[in-house]
Image (tube, rainbow, N blue to C red):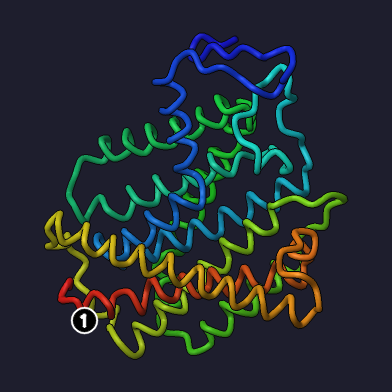
């Protein structure tokens, strides 16, 4: 097996493995988590609360567009993931998905390039240093997908290239899109109707795959966040008058904001998810704990969209108000 990690397949249990190099194992497992929901539900709100709404708005735009294209491309191309054996797969949930392109590589490349592009004038650091950081971050995430047996080298390269092209193509439209989503009176309706249409018309597969659910999470969170931006700009904070400058916040203050906000989002997720799921299962007369019923489009799409739309809305509107009440602003 590869030198980075000696994995021995056991004769009686072909899907189990023995870790011989824990440094690489944890390095790439943690790097893989940087392309998953747990990272984005923490990093994107943290950026909004502690770095800059200006930066967060551009990250959300690019993340949602690129991830939707990546998810749909997977289910249209239907390229299988690496065969196991000989590859050892360290993740279970995503094995039902197709492989090309790697959406982890797409997300990490998009987030890192967009972050550097939007913060370089804000913090006045060398462009080369920013590119080096973006390259290191996206490379770690990309290598983690190969290491965990979830993607081929080609999957990762293609995903990164697609993201780079999309960031370059959309960069000239950022200011226009930003102005539109902050000021257009139709923005909230657009952010509900269009994502739901995309989710309900997602490419159909012969067997169940979590890609539709993941896409609904992404579009729901993005929709709620953009609606929150619009509400803030029109009724709470005037973003058009914002001064784009480095935040004057201490490390302890930033940590306190994050912990308060993150706990609030976790509670919001549990409450809305439970209420939406129970209401829909009751409406369609199916058991709440039936996984097959929960995977049906008429239940999966609305309950996930409502849950993550609520999270996006809470992160941009309710959490900042909570910060203000707690004197964390």
Please say if 314 is above or below 100: below
Task: Characterize the local packing of mark 1: few (<14), some (14-19) or many (20 or more) Cα atoms within 10 angstroms.
Answer: few
Q: Say whether residue 142 is left or right of residue 155.
A: left
Query: Which quadrant of the structure image shows residue 98?
Result: top right
Q: Is residue 76 left or right of residue 188?
A: right
Residue sitting at the far right: 206
* Residue 249 spot, x, y in % from top left: 14, 61
Along the viewing direction, whichever of 293 and 252 lies nearer the viewer:
293
Q: Which of the 4 quarters of the picture holds residue 112?
A: top left
Residue 180 place in picture, x, y as percent: 45, 78
Q: Which residue is mark 1?
A: 325
Q: Quadrant of the N terminus?
A: top right
Q: In this orientation, which residue lies closer to the viewer: 226 or 117?
A: 226
**From this viewpoint, is residue 57 visible?**
yes
Q: Residue at x 48, y 32 (%)?
A: 29
Residue 151 coordinates in the image, percent (x, y):
63, 31
Residue at 57% from the left image edge and 69% from the top image edge: 220
Relative to 78, residue 205 above or below: below
| SS of the residue under disc 1 | helix
Residue 180, visible in the rendered structure: no
Residue 97, above or below 214: above
Quadrant housing the C terminus: bottom left
Coordinates of residue 169 in the picture (x, y in percent): 51, 53
At 32% from the left edge and 59% from the top edge, which residue is drawn?
46
């Amino acid at each position: 097996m590869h030198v980075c990690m000696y994995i021995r397949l056991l004769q009686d249990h072909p899907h189990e493995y023995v870790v011989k190099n824990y440094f690489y194992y944890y390095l790439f497992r943690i790097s893989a988590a940087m392309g998953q929901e747990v990272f984005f539900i923490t990093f994107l709100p943290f950026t909004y609360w502690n770095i800059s709404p200006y930066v967060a708005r551009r990250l959300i735009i690019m993340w949602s567009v690129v991830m939707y294209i990546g998810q749909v491309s997977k289910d249209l191309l239907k390229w299988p993931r690496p065969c196991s054996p000989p590859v050892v797969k360290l993740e279970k949930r995503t094995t039902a998905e197709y492989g090309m392109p790697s959406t982890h590589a797409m997300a990490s490349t998009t987030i890192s390039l967009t972050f550097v592009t939007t913060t370089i004038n804000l913090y006045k650091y060398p462009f080369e240093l920013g590119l080096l950081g973006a390259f290191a971050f996206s490379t770690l995430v990309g290598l983690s997908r190969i290491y965990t047996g979830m993607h081929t080298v080609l999957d990762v390269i293609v995903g990164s290239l697609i993201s780079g092209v999309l960031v370059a193509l959309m960069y000239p439209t950022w200011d226009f899109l930003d102005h539109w989503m902050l000021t257009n009176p139709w923005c909230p309706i657009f952010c509900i109707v269009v994502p739901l249409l995309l989710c309900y018309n997602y490419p159909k597969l012969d067997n169940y795959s979590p890609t539709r659910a993941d896409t609904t999470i992404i579009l729901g969170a993005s929709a709620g966040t953009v609606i929150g931006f619009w509400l803030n700009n029109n009724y709470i904070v005037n973003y058009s008058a914002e001064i784009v400058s480095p935040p004057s916040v201490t490390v302890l203050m930033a940590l306190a904001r994050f912990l308060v906000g993150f706990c609030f989002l976790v509670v919001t997720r549990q409450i809305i998810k439970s209420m939406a799921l129970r209401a829909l299962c009751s409406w369609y007369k199916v058991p709440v704990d039936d996984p097959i019923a929960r995977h049906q489009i008429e239940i999966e799409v609305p309950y996930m969209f409502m849950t993550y739309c609520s999270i996006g809305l809470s992160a941009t509107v309710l959490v900042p108000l909570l910060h203000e009440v707690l004197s964390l602003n």
